[in-house]
Amino acid sequence: MIRGQQLTAIIPVRGGSKGIPDKNLHRVGKDTLLERSIKLARRCSYVDRIVVSTDDPQMYAIAQKYGVAMPALRPAELATDHARTVDVVLQAMDATPVADGYILLVQATSPLRTLADLNGFCKAFDEDASGGRAIVSLVRHDSPHPDKIQKLEGGFVTSYLERDSMVARQSLPEVYALNGAFYLTDTGQLRTGRTFLPRGATLPYVMPPERSINLDNMLDVQVMDALLEKGVLKAEQYD
């Protein structure tokens, strides 16, 4: 439980990834990305329930094996490249159904996060006294800094944010990127606001870059696998 209410972890995985074929079935160690996510959530003392939402029969069978499958496959309209994660989560909440409380979004594409990361993330939210209604995992983003990003306008280069792009990097403010590892918010806010990032009410949880790798394309996978093989990166293993 978290803040005295049920915490449900929802893991959305689909079978139609174009950037990485069968992405969520890629293995890191002995487990697929989906299995790693399930096992991670099962080991978190704050998590009361786990639900896997998928349109893929093979992934559905994995979810059934661990006792975390939804009553049926995800509807096809929520398994496209353009489907919003929040809509997938809301459909899972209604179809399962999920009790009021809190939702933890655990995306399978962050395989190097650890149980200590998840426990620390939940603890930070559970003990918050500021009134935050959500928390999200971040990683410091150094390069390229947003102030230095360019766009093409009328065939000419111009600053994307209309800033002086030649300012020294050391003088720019620190910025952070969503690393995709964890999102958490309450069910009421999620239903009414339809976001995991309510403005002015989302707490930060900063993670190190070596555990913030998010797999978006085959190059990401190949680089991660090579660095794991060389021992530069480490992946937590589960029994």
Image: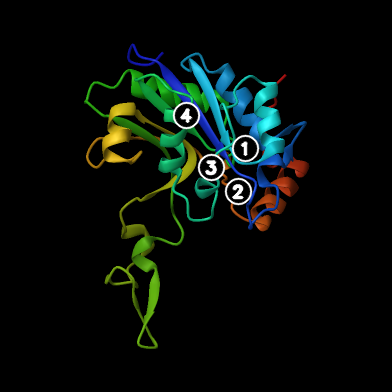
- Disc 4 designates what residue? 95
Report whether 51 appears left or right of 226. left
**How far apart are the alpha carbons under marks 4 and 2?**
28 Å
Vertical order, 53 against 44 (above or below): below
Q: Amino acid at mark 2?
A: Leu
The one of 62 and 186 positioned closer to us in this rendering: 62
**How far apart are the alpha carbons under marks 1 and 4?**
27 Å
- Mark closest to the chain's N terminus, 3 or 1: 3
- Mark closest to the chain's N terminus, 1 or 4: 4
Which of pointers 4 and 2 indicates the residue nearer the eye?
Answer: 4
Which of pointers 3 and 1 indicates the residue nearer the eye?
Answer: 3
Name the element at disc 1.
Answer: loop
Q: Are marks 4 and 2 in contact (CB under 8 Å)?
A: no
Q: Residue at (31%, 34%) from the top-left corner?
A: 191
Local packing at callout 2 (Cα closer than 10 Å; few below 14, some 14-19, many 20+) is many
Can I make out residue 202 in this image? no
Which of pointers 1 and 4 indicates the residue nearer the eye?
Answer: 4
Which of pointers 3 and 2 indicates the residue nearer the eye?
Answer: 3
Q: Amino acid at mark 1?
A: Pro
**How far apart are the alpha carbons under marks 3 and 1?**
26 Å
Q: Residue at (70%, 22%) from the top-left corner?
A: 65
Report whether 30 appears left or right of 122. right
Q: Are marks 3 and 2 in contact (CB under 8 Å)?
A: no
- Disc 3 designates what residue? 75
- Disc 1 designates what residue? 111
Quarter of the image where one finds residue 161 = bottom left
